[in-house]
Amino acid sequence: MNAACPTLHGPDFLRAPHDAAFRAGLRDWLARELPRLAAGRGPAERQSGDFRLAWETHICRAGLSGLGWPLEAGGHALSLARQAIFHEETARAGAPLAVNLIAHGIVAPTLIAFGTEAQKARFLPRILDNSEIWCQGYSEPGAGSDLAGLALKAVRDGEDYILNGQKIWTSFAHLSQYCLLLARTGQGSSPRHGISVLLVDMALPGITVRPIRQITGEADFNEIFFDDVRVPVSALLGAENDGWRLAMAAANYERSTYFVPRVVRLQIELDRLIRLASGRTRAGRPLLEDPQIRRRLGDLGLAAQALRLFADHILAQAEHGTASGTESSAIKLMWSETHQQLFDLAMEIQGTDALLGPQEPSAPEEGAWTRDYLWTRAETILAGTSEIHRNIIAERGLGLPR
Amino acid sequence: MTIASHLSFSDPELHRGVAEAMAAAALTPAGAADPAEIARHQALAQDLGWLAARIPEAEGGLELGLDFAADLCLEVGRHLITGPLRETLVLLPALAAELPELRPLLAGVLAGEIRLALAEPAGAGAGGEGAGDLVPWLRQASHVLWLEDDGAGGMQGRLCPVAALQAADLQSLDPTAGLCRVTAVPPGAAVGFVLAAEAAARVRAALDIATAAEHLGLAEAALARSLAHLGERRQFGVAIGSFQALKHRLADVQIAQSAARLAIAAAVAPGALPQAAALARILAADAAATATASGLQLLGGLGFSWENDMHLYLKRARRLACGQGGVEIRRQAAGEAVIAAALAEAD
């Protein structure tokens, strides 16, 4: 029973005696619920922010959130193995990607670890039932890879902080009620030592959200301008000027299961791509007769197998309590680059359909292949650029000089 | 020296003993063609019981798992140990497990008298079946094995005593391994055998795992040498290891090795399918290719010099990658299986 949310008891399979029964129960549940919600919606609509949010909220209201949270925080305290099974099965069922992943994956675990009782009581229940959406106010025009160079100021004034500055690339800020904000509250001995984390109400006066159009055609990320925004001191998470440490801890919470659904999805996308290719011709000949195409599809399959080994290994390490420092960077690199190669090939396999735009309704899968091709260009940039991850592996993994 | 458990496929203590012995026996570039050096390595393998690793206890062996064989072959690669160890230590016992008529050879293996070299088909020549074929390690072997797929999942093979055939010495690409061309195989000198698909799959998997592990050892050694050089070499007032382009190259080298290591671990795990061994061999060959090529590049002129060991790793990796039809055939077969599985699901 979720202490914070008595109604979110959740389906019975959550309490199954062993993992195989958990998996089977979850699979059945997904096989009933997802088609019911997706009924009548085409591929484009099923990828839309609206549907993604509707599905996510449905899952949460059914009690399937807070899976890994401690019981006293309102969670189910499921094992890592069961959390991984949940991610795997939802990916396999073709569930849409989450919208509120910042709240579930970063804000909630950080609140549980560092929040006051008042903050936990105020925010955790509404993350559990998905009634509040969060965005992550980290990057700035002048602070991307060098996040510690952030300049948005939070100046103490009585019982408030006054915020001035700008954030950029903030996904779903236009839908969010709250923002996990990194702000500069001091000038420490190094840039990292003057940063604080604030939990900011997006409805406060002085906050302006401006959508930025992505190359995919949608505008899911934003600039956020803060002009003399007053937030109460109670919005501070953890200690003042200790924010960098919290932000680094926050980045680690999802690490062990983060790639489980992603590698499952990649395998499914590859299988779909092979089937797409089997129905296509080029210069009058079946595309799958082309040894180059077969070779590239085959190589993607081998990469998918290697990625699965990595994901399982990272999960196993987490279950044994051993930290993986550079392995997360390795899998992120490998997954993002393989994912891009998959959609590069998809664009070739699409032939002249590749001329159609990402929102063109008559395109195959209503433009999904093209939208995903464009979207994957971001995957080597977000969550740490490939270049940064290679630096991490070289410096922290191989010991090369900084 | 300790070995972190994550760097061993089997018991780290067993692995450590092997690693220390091989490090102490390490080959020098000058010794690569030196008969005394070769003999020293051969004796080592026998004295320390490595040849007994995959032989059943009932036949006088240690009956250790493929996971230990993988650690052994890893160190063979890392230290460029000479001799047909992969073939004698892993392949021959794997064949003997399927073919009772080969079991009497195992006593000879333990005694250091029987060593197996694996022939590579190189086009027909006059002089009997097998003439014209290339055999690494022929002069260090007592028997030559021909092994080929029958096209239906099985294998057929022939085993011939070295004393019965004639061979010419060739310059080998890999200076750490002698090479011969078979010039004559008298009729009846070779004994034939056949392996059905399931048995063939087990033999193939064993050889794939051993080869993958040796590739990984080469890759790890090349990376270690690259890192050492990058720490010492200074240009423009700094250690060249601080240059991002070189860091990024070695990060990719490391990732390839991590993938290969995970694949070998999966292939030696209980209940592993033969496809896991094939994946391991492909990934490890790729890891060795990139590590040795990068190693040569990062060492600059030194990397290109015969006197520096780096070329030995490059060349041995290339030799192993050519074997049994080469990595590309495996890559193609594994890829075809991916496509077939996706299309089958749709039906």
Image (spheres, coloured by chain):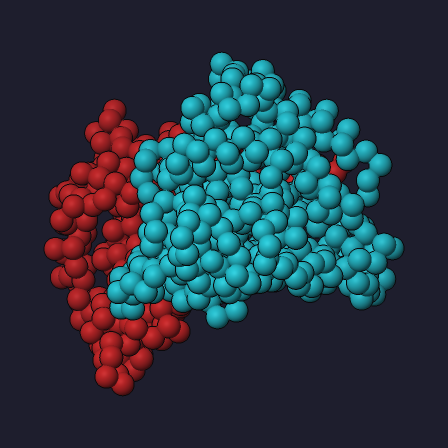
Chain colours: A cyan, B red
Q: Return the x and y of residue A305 as percentages of the image width and height.
A: 52, 45
Q: Return the x and y of residue B119 as percentages of the image width and height.
A: 41, 54
Could you say which quadrant of the image residue B227 lies in?
bottom left
Between B116 and A11, the residue placed more toward the observer is A11
Q: Return the x and y of residue A207 as percentages of the image width and height.
A: 59, 57
Between A280 and B197, the residue placed more toward the observer is A280
Between A19 and A9, the residue placed more toward the observer is A9
- Evaluate whether residue A97 shows in this view: yes
Could you say which quadrant of the image residue A91 lies in?
top right
Left or right of B226 in this view: A349 = right
Left or right of A201 in this view: A354 = right
Write the residue at 46% across / 63% down: A152
With respect to residue B113, does A185 lie above or below? below
With respect to residue B247, does A132 lie above or below? above
Between A334 and A41, the residue placed more toward the observer is A41
Write the residue at 62% across / 35% down: A131
Left or right of B206 in this view: A283 = right
- Evaluate whether residue B147 shows in this view: no
Q: How many discs mark residues in the rendered view?
A: 0
Placement of the C terminus of chain B among the 4 image quadrants: top right
Q: In the image as oriented, which residue stretches furthest toward the front?
A: A158
Write the residue at 82% across / 40% down: A41
With respect to residue B151, does B251 lie above or below? below
